[in-house]
Structures are given as structure tokens and as C-alpha cells.
Amino acid sequence: MSKRQRQVVYGLLIVAGFGGAAYSFLGRSSPAKVSDTLTIQGLCLSCKHEGAVQHPNTEPAPHKCPECGQQAVYPLMYCFDCRRRFVPELVRTDPAGPPRIPPSFRCPGCRSSNVIQFIPNQPELQPVGDLPPPRWN
Ligand SMILES: [Zn+2]
Ligand SMILES: [Zn+2]
């Protein structure tokens, strides 16, 4: 091996070393990253389990239920006007897929559009009750 060739080989080894270090750095930091998942207060329309559900932020509702395993957890909403929690009326956009939350919706109880996604333990969000969940399947 000539001196020139040896320099090239060492150069490649150094680049590979840096690449490996950067890769392991990214690999280490990814579990701490929280921006790619969302936690919602959801209601399972299959088994009626309610609780916090974590899902990838690219995944639209419904999400997988930790209790019954069905893809049937929808986010709970809160109506500021009648102060009840609800799951919006669902729409079936894809005949083969599950029903989805429409892009805009009103409170099924009082028809108000003054609604927000429900967050537990918020002083501004004090529900007085729940509206019956929509039909599912
Ligand atoms: Zn369930
Ligand atoms: Zn309402």
C-alpha cells in the first residue's frame, strides 16, 4: 500500500467514525424526544374505557385501546356552553376504515361550536356530565 493510499484509508475510517458517533448520538436522543407522540384523554367506544392514550402524532383517531385492544379510542371534547364532555358524531370517510372525527363539529348536546379537546385537571374545564357517545360500528 502506498503512502497516498494509506492516507485515503485513514480518511475514510475517520469519516466512518464520525458518522457512527453521530448515529449513536441521534439514536440515544430519540427516546427522550416527545414531539412525535401526543397524549389525549380518550374514550373507547368499544369497551367504554376512559383514560390517557398516547399515540403517534401522525395517527388520526381512533387509537388502540389499552383495555380491549380495539382501534376504538376517540378523544373526549368539552363544551364550554353546557359544560359536558362528549365524543363528536363520527363520519365514515373510508368505507373500509374506521369512522373518523370530522374536521369541524359542534356539541351534540346544545349545538354550540364553543368546544375544545378535553384536558383533565384543568380549572377552566369542569365538566358537569357526559353526553352519550356516538354510535360506533
Ligand atoms: Zn376498549
Ligand atoms: Zn354543549
Image (cartoon, rainbow, N blue to C red):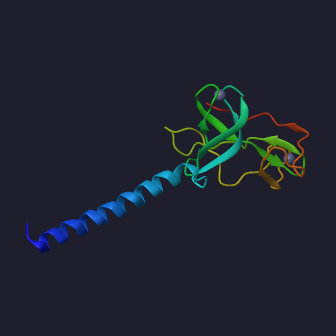
Q: Choose between 25 and 53: the one closer to the eye.
A: 25
x, y percent for residue 33? 58, 53
Residue at figure coordinates x 46%, y 52% from the top left? 27
Residue at figure coordinates x 19%, y 71% from the top left? 7
Query: Farthest front residue?
Result: 3
Q: Quadrant of the C terminus?
A: top right
- Depicted 3 relative to depicted 18: above or below: below
Residue at figure coordinates x 73%, y 35% from the top left? 51
Q: Choose between 49 and 21: the one closer to the eye.
A: 21
Residue at figure coordinates x 72%, y 44% from the top left? 88
How many numbered discs? 0
Q: Quadrant of the N terminus?
A: bottom left
- Depicted 119 relative to depicted 69: above or below: below
Left or right: residue 61 compared with residue 42:
left
Left or right: residue 21 compared with residue 90:
left
x, y percent for residue 74? 67, 40
Left or right: residue 61 compared with residue 106:
left
x, y percent for residue 40? 69, 44
Q: Choose between 137 and 7: the one closer to the eye.
A: 7
Query: Farthest left residue?
Result: 1
x, y percent for residue 48? 72, 28
